Image (cartoon, rainbow, N blue to C red):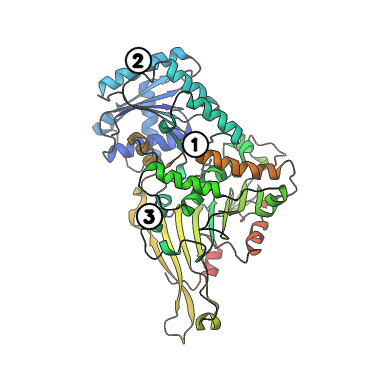
């Protein structure tokens, strides 16, 4: 049931414009939203309802999956949206908001449900939660859910403090912490592919898998977010959340039931099994950090990180981060998970590569030939699909063995209409399905792991490598895998692709 009044705090911001409003529109067009809903946009600056609806139209025209024209259908949709200027520190404003909310509730026969979406800086979460209660916003019959964006704290102590403030007002079960990677189609597909296929499920362990590689590479720099990013860095911006979440999804046991808490329990077990670093030297041996210098990306000259707006010209913040991670449990003992992310890398891609162990060496094939490893690749972003690389005889040859590929390209089939992560997540929150949101214990364990890395790096910066924009980051990240006898497999779009995979039949 998606009947609700949705209250969007930060309605004039980038997230609302690029993601939330287009998501509302897509859900509406797909009839998932129904008619018994209202959306109130909230921000400090004054805006009339008409202006707000114009902004809404522009954002949808620019970012939505569906085309929109200003016709009758549009007016019916836009009528569900109102705007109110609100000072979030003033409880009187929340009382007025409460009145407006109740009016819209009556107008659209909503029935009392409220979804509060905080697209705001986390420092404001506590006072918003407090004033929601004080202003009577939680008095309606029906459910009251809080959806919050990352970053959830800067480290474990700050996350604990933030959590305590929110928990004074909301129960854990009503808090929906967004990690938009969990809303991506292919991340959700990982468990289906794992658990629903007889030829993967039995192999999903340290007997058959040699290592797992997770790459989240971006071509963008820090754009207009220099102020936030310079304090955060790649480890906190991507490592603590998206990367550890994807790792947990890859490594978790099958849940006993398809219930949100069962899935989240299994991820918690993985996060609890992460081998924490005990010393600064362990951190140094198992992590790599880098920062982009000026360089050339897709033929365009771009400035270095330290020259970006709102970034300290002597900043030592990492824009690249890689790590060798171990999950100390029975299933994964001895299997390294290599994770890496960076800004200003040559391609934008998110991929997970599962590398299988080789067939035994005494088999006649392996004696005579150098066999390539079997790979299973989840392509998450921007192309979606599954790629399987195996060995086969070259047709017409005397027994030459070549790597061949089976390529399931989901985005080629479903095209641009694959739901955006935010559509899925907004819909799930409105239905009360928290499977793809992070629970507090997951967040806390991830911070615990990440805090040890940050502490290991400490004040020393002699291991912060500078890499030219448009390259694959510090060489040390290649060495880290080479020490274990592995290498990063080329991701889709990487130039090396053409060289390494030249025999792959498509
Ligand atoms: C966000 C990070 O969580 O994820 C950004 O704060 C990053 O720095 C973004 O650019 C990447 O998301 P996506 O969906 O474009 O891969």
- The mark that comes first in sequence, 3 or 2, is 2
Asked if residue 121 shows in the view, the reply is: no
Quadrant assignment, res 430: top left
The percent position of residue 340, horizontal first and vertical second, equals 58, 52
The percent position of residue 301, horizontal first and vertical second, equals 62, 49
Asked if residue 239 shows in the view, the reply is: yes
Q: Residues within 10 Å of mark 1 (few under 14, many from 20)?
A: some
Residue at figure coordinates x 48%, y 22% from the top left: 128
Residue at figure coordinates x 68%, y 48% from the top left: 278
Q: Residue furthest front?
A: 330
Q: Residues within 10 Å of mark 2 (few under 14, many from 20)?
A: some
Q: Quadrant where the N terminus lies?
A: top left
Is residue 342 placed above or below 73 in the rendered structure? below
**Nearer to the camera, 27 or 307:** 27
Q: Secondary structure at mark 2?
A: helix
**Nearer to the camera, 296 or 185:** 185
- Residue denoted by label 3: 192
Mark nearest the camera among 3 and 1 is 1
In this rendering, the count of numbered labels is 3
On the rendered structure, is 431 left or right of 345?
left
Residue at figure coordinates x 53%, y 79% from the top left: 366
Marks 3 and 2, how far apart at CA: 45 Å
Marks 3 and 1, how far apart at CA: 25 Å
The percent position of residue 309, horizontal first and vertical second, equals 63, 36
Is the residue under label 2 in contact with that under label 3 (CB below 8 Å)? Answer: no
- Residue denoted by label 1: 440
Q: Secondary structure at mark 1?
A: helix
On the rendered structure, is 162 left or right of 409?
right
- Residue denoted by label 2: 99
Is residue 154 placed above or below 105 in the rendered structure? below
Mark nearest the camera among 1 and 2 is 1
């Amino acid at each position: 049931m998606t009947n609700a009044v949705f209250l969007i705090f930060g309605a004039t911001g980038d997230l609302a414009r690029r993601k939330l409003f287009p998501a509302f529109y897509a859900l509406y067009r797909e009839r998932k939203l129904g008619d018994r809903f209202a959306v109130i946009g909230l921000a400090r600056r004054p805006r009339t309802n008409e202006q707000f609806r114009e902004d809404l139209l522009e954002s949808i025209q620019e970012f939505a999956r569906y085309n929109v024209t200003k016709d009758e259908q549009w007016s019916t949709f836009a009528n569900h949206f109102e705007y109110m200027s609100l000072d979030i520190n003033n409880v009187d404003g929340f009382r007025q908001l409460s009145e407006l909310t109740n009016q819209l509730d009556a107008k659209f026969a909503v029935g009392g449900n409220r979804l509060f979406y905080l697209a705001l800086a986390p420092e404001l979460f506590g006072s918003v939660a407090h004033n929601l209660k004080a202003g009577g916003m939680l008095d309606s019959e029906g459910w009251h859910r809080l959806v919050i964006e990352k970053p959830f704290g800067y480290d474990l102590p700050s996350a604990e403090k933030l959590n305590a403030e929110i928990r004074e007002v909301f129960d854990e079960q009503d808090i929906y912490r967004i990690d938009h990677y969990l809303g991506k189609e292919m991340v959700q597909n990982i468990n289906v592919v794992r658990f629903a296929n007889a030829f993967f499920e039995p192999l999903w362990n340290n007997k058959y898998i040699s290592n797992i590689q997770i790459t989240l590479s971006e071509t963008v720099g820090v754009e207009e977010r220099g102020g936030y990013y310079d304090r955060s860095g790649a480890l906190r911006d991507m490592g603590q959340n998206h990367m550890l979440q994807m790792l947990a999804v890859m490594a978790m046991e099958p849940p006993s039931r398809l219930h949100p808490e069962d899935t989240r329990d299994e991820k918690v077990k993985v996060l609890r099994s992460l081998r924490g670093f005990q010393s600064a030297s362990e951190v140094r041996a198992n992590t790599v950090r880098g920062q982009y210098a000026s360089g050339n990306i897709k033929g365009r000259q771009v400035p270095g990180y330290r020259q970006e707006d709102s970034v300290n010209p002597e900043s030592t913040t990492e824009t690249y981060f890689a790590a060798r991670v171990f999950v100390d449990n029975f299933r994964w003992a001895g299997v390294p998970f290599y994770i890496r992310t960076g800004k200003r890398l040559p391609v934008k891609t998110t991929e997970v590569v599962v590398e299988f162990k080789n067939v035994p060496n005494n088999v006649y094939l392996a004696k005579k030939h150098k066999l390539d490893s079997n790979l299973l690749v989840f392509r998450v972003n921007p192309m979606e699909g599954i790629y399987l690389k195996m060995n086969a005889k070259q047709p017409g040859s005397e027994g030459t063995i070549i790597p061949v590929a089976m390529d399931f390209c989901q985005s080629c089939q479903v095209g641009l209409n694959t739901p955006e992560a935010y559509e899925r997540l907004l819909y799930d929150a409105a239905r009360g399905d928290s499977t793809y949101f992070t629970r507090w214990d997951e967040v806390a364990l991830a911070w615990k792991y990440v805090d040890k890395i940050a502490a290991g790096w400490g004040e020393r910066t002699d291991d912060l490598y500078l890499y030219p924009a448009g390259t694959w980051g510090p060489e040390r990240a290649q060495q880290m895998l080479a020490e274990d006898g592995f290498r990063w497999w080329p991701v889709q779009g990487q130039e090396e692709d053409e060289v390494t995979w030249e025999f792959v039949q498509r």
